[in-house]
Amino acid sequence: DAKTTQPPSMDCAEGRAANLPCNHSTISGNEYVYWYRQIHSQGPQYIIHGLKNNETNEMASLIITEDRKSSTLILPHATLRDTAVYYCIVRVDYGGSQGNLIFGKGTKLSVKP
Amino acid sequence: ETGVTQSPTHLIKTRGQQVTLRCSSQSGHNTVSWYQQALGQGPQFIFQYYREEENGRGNFPPRFSGLQFPNYSSELNVDALELDDSALYLCASSPNRRNTEAFFGQGTRLTVV
C-alpha cells in the first residue's frame, strides 16, 4: 500500500499557483519524498524530490514540513498543460538499495481557464 | 520525450496466450523497472532489473517474467494471459538501481479478450 495520502481531486485557475498537499506521517528518516505527474495517456513524469529541505527546480517547488510528516508541491503559475494526476511517493529502500516507486491514486489536478 | 521507448504501443491478445513487451532504456541508464497500471489506478511495481539481473519484485505471480540485455534494454513476458492482465504496462529507466529520477516510457496498452 502507498504510504501517502492525497486529496483525490483539486481545481486551480490558470495562472494561479497550484498547491498540492500530501501526508506521509509514517515516513522514515532515510526516505525521500518524490513527486510525479501523469498526463492522460502518457507515462508518469518526474517532477521533483527532496529529503527534508525545501527544493525548487524549473517545474515546481517542494515544501516539506519540519517533522517531515507532510509536504506540498507548488506549481507557481499553473497552465492548462499542467492538468494531470499528481502522485506523491515515499521511496522505499530494500536491503539491496533497490528503490521501486509505490504509487497511490494521486490527485487529479484540473487547471481551468 | 524521455528517451525511453516501448513497443508495441497497443496490443490485443486472447486469454491463455503469451505476450512479450519491449523497452529501450535511456542512454546511460542501467536500471529498468516495469509497472502495471489498471484503469483508474496508480502504477503497480512488477519488477526491476539492474545490470541484467532481477533486483526486486512486487506482488505479481511467476507468469510475469522479464529479461534485461547487455545494452540494458528489457522485455516483460506474461504467460497464460488472464482478462485482468488488461492494463497499461509502463517501463521506467534510471541511471541507478535506487531509481532516482526514473524516466517512464509512454507505455503499452494491453487488452486481453
Image (cartoon, rainbow, N blue to C red):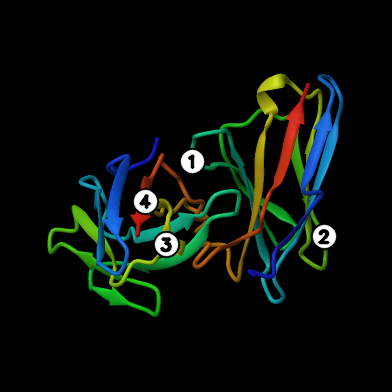
Q: What amino acid type is highlighted by mark number 2?
A: Phe
| Cα distance between the residues tagged 1 and 3 | 22 Å
Mark 1 and mark 2 lie on one chain; the one further toward the N terminus is 1
- Residue ID for mark 4: A110
Task: Tell me if residue A7 comes above or below residue B22 in the rendering.
Answer: above
Do the residues bearing badges 3 and 2 touch, measured as CB atoms within 8 Å?
A: no
> Which three-letter amino acid code belongs to the residue tagged 1?
Gly
Q: Which residue corresponds to mark 3?
A: A80
**What SS does tag 1 mark?**
loop
The image shows residue A105 at horizontal and vertical percentages of: 41, 39
Label 4 sits on what residue type?
Answer: Ser
Residue shown at the point (41%, 41%) measured from the top left:
A104
Report if the CB atoms under discs 1 and 3 are less than 8 Å apart. no
| Label 4 secondary element | strand
What is the spatial separation of the Cα atoms under label 4 and label 3, in whole angstroms? 8 Å
Please state, as top left, top right, bottom left or bottom right, where the C terminus of chain B lies in the image. Answer: top right
Residue labelled with disc 2: B69
Chain to which the residue tagged by mark 3 belongs? A
Are labels 4 and 1 on one chain? no
Provide residue B68's location: percent of width, then percent of height: 78, 56
Same chain letter for marks 3 and 2: no
Indicate the position of residue B83 as horizontal and vertical percent values: 71, 20
Residue at horizontal 45 percent and vertical 45 percent from the top: A102
What residue appears at the point 75 percent right and 39 percent down from the top-left corner?
A: B65
Q: Secondary structure at mark 3?
A: helix
How packed mark 4 is, by other alpha carbons closer than 10 Å (few <14, some 14-19, many 20 or more), is many
Residue A15, picture quadrant: bottom left
Chain letter, disc 2 residue: B
Q: Is residue B47 visible?
A: yes
Mark 4 and mark 3 lie on one chain; the one further toward the N terminus is 3
Q: Is residue A57 above or below residue B74?
A: below
